[in-house]
Image (cartoon, coloured by chain):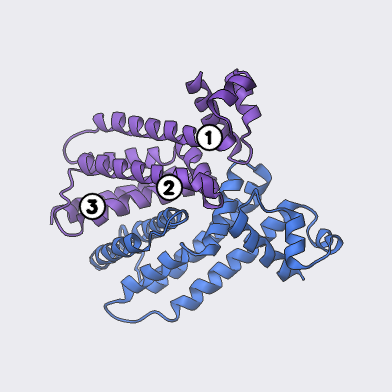
Chain colours: A blue, B purple
Amino acid sequence: MRARLLEATVELLVERGFAGTSTTLVSERAGVSRGAQLHHFPTKNDLVVAAVEHLAQRRGDELGEAATRLPEGQRRTRAVLEMLGDHFSSPVFSAALELWVAARTDEALRAAVGPLEQRVGRETHRLTVTALGADESKPGVRELVQATLDLVRGLGLASTISDDSARRRRILREWADVLDKEMVR
Amino acid sequence: MRARLLEATVELLVERGFAGTSTTLVSERAGVSRGAQLHHFPTKNDLVVAAVEHLAQRRGDELGEAATRLPEGQRRTRAVLEMLGDHFSSPVFSAALELWVAARTDEALRAAVGPLEQRVGRETHRLTVTALGADESKPGVRELVQATLDLVRGLGLASTISDDSARRRRILREWADVLDKEMVR
């Protein structure tokens, strides 16, 4: 029942945004009584924060799973970047974005979202370092991995209100070539 | 009076977000009667869309003005990136982000925000090309300029819920060195 409530919350965040997500809509969507819902999650913030955690877990699992299907050899960097680009343009990113932006002006939400995003950020960074085979002891490499993640976050934001996939592909291809040159210096 | 209403709208978007911005609050903040406000902007969407246009103008002016103060010579690329990084982490970016995210789930708002953001995107791109002295006829240079703007957008998003300026500076310094190498090839 808990999982159903969290899935319904994520769906509503994607479809209607943070403001359009109410506890009433969530209980209807999940097919769970109001009483049972309130027992698990007394407030909207409890619900969305738990949904963020659930999301974070799912984001990590999805990425980790995608990482196992990456090709070896010359095309690997491009494939890593495409994987990250797709990930940061998915509905799951939209739901996270809704919470992120709502947290900007909601202190209680920010207190929960901030540390969680830091943890997710660290995990995504670690996964990217491994996938790229990056050696962070070399000067500048750590910053380039971080830049890569900030780039795909920016591309994800650009893709939220229009299909930006062709432009994204061109940019990431070029970025991959730069990374390949810079990481081996 | 129109300008006062638009400034008040931008301020409220920054402070309270899209959902927390109401026409009542705007008229109070601007010191304009409800009647006069409704005459200029019949609905909340009319008001926020006009505020986006106003914002876009201000974003362009601010950047153009900052671009005239850039140093020449070796430090220029770093200075350009710092200027863009600061710009995309300013309150003006937060207000734009609020509209951007609200537009994702509001079709009428999206119809107004989409084309405007495209126009602003093109202008920012042109300004960046000029500031960097980039030659887009060379292969890959256009994509690297676009990547730079998506990177600062991603950094801007990261800075909305915590102060990220030290990390941003390190990343942009490294990226400036890469750009300097890549643009002259």
Q: Quadrant of the C terminus of chain B?
A: bottom left
Chain assignment, label 2:
B
Q: Nearer the viewer, mark 3 or mark 2?
A: 2
The Cα–Cα distance between marks 1 and 2, rounded to whole angstroms, is 15 Å
Disc 3 residue crowd, few under 14, some 14–19, many 20+, Cα 10 Å: many
Residue in view at x 33 percent, y 65 percent: A169
Q: Are marks 1 and 2 in contact (CB under 8 Å)?
A: no
Residue projecting furthest to the right? A35
The Cα–Cα distance between marks 3 and 1, rounded to whole angstroms, is 41 Å
Sooner in the amino-acid sequence: mark 1 or mark 2 = 1
The Cα–Cα distance between marks 3 and 2, rounded to whole angstroms, is 29 Å
Q: Amino acid at mark 1?
A: Asp
Residue located beneath label 3 in the image:
B179
Residue located beneath label 2 in the image:
B114
Residue located beneath label 1 in the image:
B46
> In the rendered view, does A66 fall on the left or right side of B12?
left
Residue in view at x 53 percent, y 34 percent: B46
Q: Nearer the viewer, mark 3 or mark 1?
A: 1
